Image (tube, grey):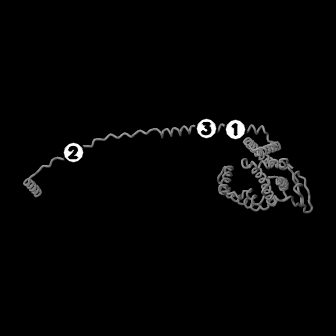
Amino acid sequence: MNPIINSLSLIADAAEYLDRSTSAAWRIRATLTNMAVWAANSYVWLEENQPDSERMHRDRIKLSTIRCWLRDCNTSAFALDLTPGNVRKTLGLERITDLHEDACRIARAKCMQTRSAANFQKYYQSALELAEARKQQRERAVERIANILSDHGWTLEGQVFDARGYNTIYETLTFVFDEDLADEDLMETEIDKLSDTLANALEAMYVEVDNQLAAAIVTAKINRLAGYKVAIEQMMSIVGVDKAVLARRQVQLEQQLEAERKLLDGKAKTLDEQIEAQMAAMQAPTPEPQPEPTKPEPTKPKPEPKVKTTAAERKAAREARLAAKAAA
């Protein structure tokens, strides 16, 4: 069995204890769950579309190896939830997606590859149909995947290939246990992914346990954290994490944080200066408004004196007007 899988129990308690601040346990569980569910989904698809193919036999061996790993993990604190509900979530069936946007993105990428937009609608429709078919296939496969991951072996009949190309012929239905089919030589990609996840989780746990150990003052907590640190260091040596590289990355990170802090301090000082200037402007005495000079009012022209006329003069003027009108 793989030494990394066998040694997961070393850091199980530490990962759970530090999970709130590092998400270490969640990351390890997610990697193992994704590995198992997608391997089973690939096997189910091959079972429906390419039965008795060499790839199907290889996927069966991979699934046997993964199931052996999962049973070993379930004996530690990294017990996995492989119920149909969690399988649906891992397959992305509960994720809310915009099929129109996804189909447009795929169609646009194909048009860019062909340097022509003439078949955009064809690519768009094809992408929609493919997404719908993929969703239906995964919906059908949920229960089958959950059942496959809960089994301990395979019922085989006929010609069966192993990882090295040798074939075995079972004349009758024969139950073969996972331990008899498992072969870790096919699991290089999966082991690399698991090692990367563990390396990142161990790095975060190592830094966090150092910080908590420096701040701890209770004897029981100090002893617990010291034990966790020893277990983390042992697991780092098993996974192959270089502590010198880890220390160098930590120094670089601290230098970057220090540079960002200085930049923020400079911005904060500038902001403080602006605030002080505004406060000084508010506290400065405001000048009293000066009254506007009054303009002299314009003098009104005096009305001309009225000329007084007698009644005889007014009568003569009226008769003259009447005479002029009659003459006209």
The Cα–Cα distance between marks 3 and 1, rounded to whole angstroms, is 16 Å
Local crowd size for mark 2, using a 10 Å CA cut-off: few (<14), some (14–19), many (≥20): few
| Residue at x-position 53% and y-position 38% | 276
Residue 54 shows in the view: no
Local crowd size for mark 1, using a 10 Å CA cut-off: few (<14), some (14–19), many (≥20): few
Mark in front: 1 vs 2:
1
Q: Amino acid at mark 1?
A: Glu
Asked whether 303 or 318 is in front, the reply is 303
Q: Amino acid at mark 3?
A: Asp
Q: In the rendering, at what x and y percent does residue 33 appear?
A: 78, 54
**Mark 3, residue position:** 265
The Cα–Cα distance between marks 1 and 2, rounded to whole angstroms, is 90 Å
Q: Earlier in the sequence, mark 2 or mark 3?
A: 3
Q: In the rendering, at what x and y percent does residue 159 appear?
A: 89, 58
Residue 131 falls in which quadrant of the image?
A: bottom right
Q: In the rendering, at what x and y percent does residue 87 appear?
A: 76, 58
Pointers 1 and 2 in contact (CB under 8 A)? no
| Residue at x-position 31% and y-position 41% | 294
Asked whether 99 or 258 is in front, the reply is 258
- State how many labels appear: 3
| Residue at x-position 90% and y-position 62% | 173
- Which SS class for mark 3? helix
**Mark 1, residue position:** 254
Mark in front: 2 vs 3:
3
Mark seen at residue 301:
2
Q: Earlier in the sequence, mark 3 or mark 1?
A: 1
Residue 64 falls in which quadrant of the image?
A: bottom right
Residue 296 shows in the view: yes
- Which SS class for mark 2? loop
- Which SS class for mark 1? helix
Asked whether 220 or 108 is in front, the reply is 220
Q: Amino acid at mark 2?
A: Pro
